[in-house]
Image (cartoon, helix red, strand yellow):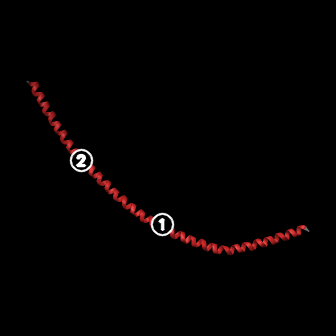
Amino acid sequence: MDGCTSKQERRSMRSVNKETSTEKGRGRRPMRREMDEREKVMFEKLGAAERVWRKERKKLREEVKRLRKKVEERDEAKTTTTTEERVYWKLIVEEMCVERAMRDEAIEKWKQL
């Protein structure tokens, strides 16, 4: 007899569980709505953050372009100076060659005496 009562109790527990699950289902709809609202707010914030990020990215790209131009100008200035220095050194080497030739001629004249 005890077995029958325990089965009956189980059935009643199952029916209680079903009732609570349907109540939970009804409670889920407002929770789902709340979650949808949260997601909307989150996506709006995310969209705003992306717009800010894009503006910042654009500013940084412009700054990089500006800095690259400055670096190129400096490099050009250095190469210009280097070109002038090359011309200067070329003239000095030519002058040294002329002096060496004059010295060699003077030595040859001295040897002939």
Residue 43, x across and y down, in percent = 53, 69
- On the rendered image, what quadrant is the N terminus found in? bottom right
Q: Are marks 2 and 1 in contact (CB under 8 Å)?
A: no
Q: With 74 as the anchor, is 1 left or right in this view? A: right
Residue nearest the observer in this picture, 61 or 96: 61
Residue type, mark 2 in image:
Thr
- Judged from the image, the secondary structure of the residue bearing numbered disc 1 is helix
Residue 94, x across and y down, in percent = 17, 39
Kindly report which numbered mark, 2 or 1, lies closer to the viewer in this rendering: 1
Mark 1 burial class by Cα count in 10 Å: few <14, some 14-19, many 20+: few
The label number, if any, that marks residue 83 in the structure image: 2
- Residue located 57% across and 70% down the image: 38
Question: Where 109 sits versus 23, above or below?
Answer: above
Residue type, mark 1 in image:
Ala
> To which quarter of the image does residue 36 belong?
bottom right
Name which of mark 2 and mark 1 comes first in the sequence.
1
- On the rendered image, what quadrant is the C terminus found in? top left
Question: Where 37 sits versus 112, above or below?
Answer: below
Residue nearest the observer in this picture, 58 or 99: 58
Q: Which residue is mark 1?
A: 49
- Residue located 82% across and 71% down the image: 11
Residue 33, x across and y down, in percent = 61, 74
> To which quarter of the image does residue 71 belong?
bottom left
